[in-house]
Amino acid sequence: MKETLSTSEKENPKHRNALEEKYQHEEKEPLNPENIKSQESQLPEPSGWRLLVLPFTPREKTKGGILIAQESLEKLRIATNCGYVLKMGPLAYQDKDKYPTGPWCKIGEWVIFARYAGSRLPIEGGEVRILNDDEVLGTINDPESVLQHN
């Protein structure tokens, strides 16, 4: 007796490889300023002259749809030099002798800092950094405009 397969069984293979699953997997949103509010309870409060900064997280997929290897993404995350200011300590930019023109940045701005500056604190979904107020090198409008190189 000859067994016939329906057309749907012929078209849909039963095994899947990891690359297919990655393309069809619901894209997990990296931590960014919009969704960090859900993590508010686990964020530390910076003390003294320190700032709490959320490092910029590069996308897992390029605009053309090419997936970036996890190893490369991890190197980019560690070496990132842009971040979003989440909180400021009570003494940040208060020294009038050191900052005669006022604060170098404020909460809600994107800043540039040295590649390995600050202390890294892992939180669910990513990490935050605590920087000294004088480690901020400048402010930027769009972190994607600054090329992230290793």
Image (cartoon, rainbow, N blue to C red):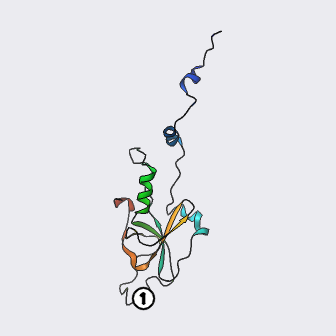
Q: Position of residue 44 (x, y in %)?
A: 56, 73
Q: Residue at x 41, y 58 (%)?
A: 76
In the image shown, does 99 or 44 lie closer to the viewer? 44
Q: Amino acid at mark 1?
A: Asp
Q: Position of residue 26 (x, y in %)?
A: 54, 46
Q: Quadrant of the N terminus?
A: top right
Residue 77 visible? The answer is: yes
Q: Residue at x 50, y 67 (%)?
A: 128
Secondary structure of residue under mark 1: loop
Q: Position of residue 4 (x, y in %)?
A: 61, 15
Residue under circle 1? 95
In the image shown, does 59 or 37 lie closer to the viewer? 59
Q: Quadrant of the C terminus?
A: bottom left
For this orientation, the residue located farthest to the top is: 1
For this orientation, the residue located farthest to the right is: 1
Give neighbour class at mark 1: few <14, some 14-19, many 20+ (Cα, 10 Å). Answer: few
